[in-house]
Each structure stands twice: as C-alpha cells, then as structure tokens.
Amino acid sequence: MTAFRVFLVLQKVFNALLSGGVFVTNRLVAASRPREFVFFKGYSVAYPAHLVKTVGPGIPSVTWFYNMDTNRLTYDSDDSFESIPWLSARIQYNGMNLYSLDDFISEVKYSSSRRDAPSPSVIVGAWSLQSGIVLDNNANLELCVITELGEIDVFSPWSFTPINATQYHTLPSITPIDPLFVESNGDIRAVSSEPFQEQMDDLQSLETT
C-alpha cells in the first residue's frame, strides 16, 4: 500500500513537470514566431497570422498584415513604406481625450501594392495590439486627428473606409505666369505680358536709332 502511494505521488510530480515543460515549450515556440497579425475585410480585430487560414471557402479577404516587431502594415508589398499623414491622433469621448496615439502614429509605416492607405479601423486595431488597450465598440468613441495640413478630421475608430492619404499631400507648385495687361491707345487695344506703352516706347526708340 505504501509503495502504491509513493507511485501515485511520483506520478503526480511527473505529470506536473510534464505539463510545465509543455507550457514552457509552447511559450518558447510562440515567442520564436514573428508577431504578425492579419486584418480581414469587415473585421476590426486582428488575428495571429500563424493561427488562422487566409484562403478557403467562406474566409474573408485579407486587407492588411501587421508586424508588431517592425510596426509595419503591409499588403503584398514590403517596400516604399509611407507614414500615416497625421500629425496627431486621439481617441475621444464626448470631447474628452481618452488616449493619445501620437507615439504610435509617428512610428508606424505602411506599404500596399493597391496604393491605398489603411482605414481608421486598421490603424486603431494595430495601435490596440501595441498598447494592449481594447476599445469598446459599443461606446460612442471618436478618432480625432490633425492632418499634415493642420486640419482637424474626426473618424469612427471602426471605420473601414481607407483614409485618403493623397488629399493631405501638398499640391505641386505652379510656375507663376506673368500678368496680362490690357491697354488702349486711341483705336488700338493691346493685350500683352508687358505694358503697351512700354512696347510703344521701345518701338520709337528703335525708329530714332
């Protein structure tokens, strides 16, 4: 009987060690994987890339991949990274600032073969992964941003509409055009880039010479 009890005790110890070893192994395997997540179309929550299928019947299309280690959003592209065209971003409730996304916005970059920018839902979702803050989508929250042009825009944090990055880019400079002059001299009316009287003076000076 004593030997059987000793066996049971040793079995419990062995099972505890085995369970602990499996737990540690799983943690090490998980830690060795890149912290990459997938955003699906119509979903504001990102899923670990190594745990979900991205192709198959009934599976929504992928909109973005997010790598937490590099802080990069990508879709079928890993070059020509661009910055989010915001100077500042905050989560607000009823005009009160709850969370600042400024540090995240200044560091995150994106690249897409579609040449589009991420939606507020994707940006906020990636920020949630980095910050560990999960927002209540039943609350009337707002994403208030300041664009590169100093304008204030307000979005829903769960909007799936890509931000129009091109509207924040500075328009190309326009080469100035010399003004036109409209002058009358008797029955003659002239339209020119130089004052008409100056042209007449130049002609007279040529005739005298």
Image (tube, rainbow, N blue to C red):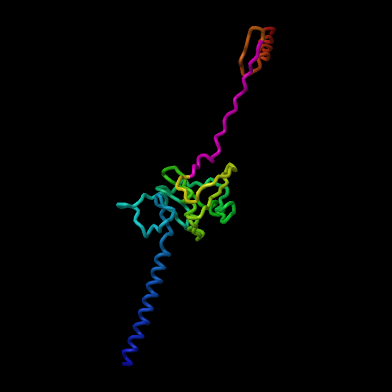
Q: Does the magenta stretch include residue 176?
A: yes
Q: Which residue is drawn at 35% across and 79% down?
A: 15
Res. 201 image quadrant: top right
Image location of residue 148, percent across then percent down:
57, 43
Image location of residue 37, percent across then percent down:
42, 56
Question: Position of 17 compared to 85: left or right?
Answer: left
Q: Which of 202 and 120 is in front in this view?
A: 120
Image location of residue 20, percent across then percent down:
40, 75
Give above or below for 172 relative to 16.
above
Placement of the C terminus among the 4 image quadrants: top right
Res. 205 image quadrant: top right
Q: Which of 12 and 160 is in front in this view?
A: 160
In the displayed orientation, state which residue is furthest to the bottom.
2
Question: Position of 202 compared to 19: left or right?
Answer: right
Q: Residue at x 58, y 29 (%)?
A: 175
Q: Does the magenta stretch include residue 174?
A: yes
Image location of residue 14, percent across then percent down:
36, 81
Region of the chain picked out in magenta, as a range = 163-184
Q: Which of 135 and 148 is in front in this view?
A: 135
Give above or below for 22 relative to 177.
below
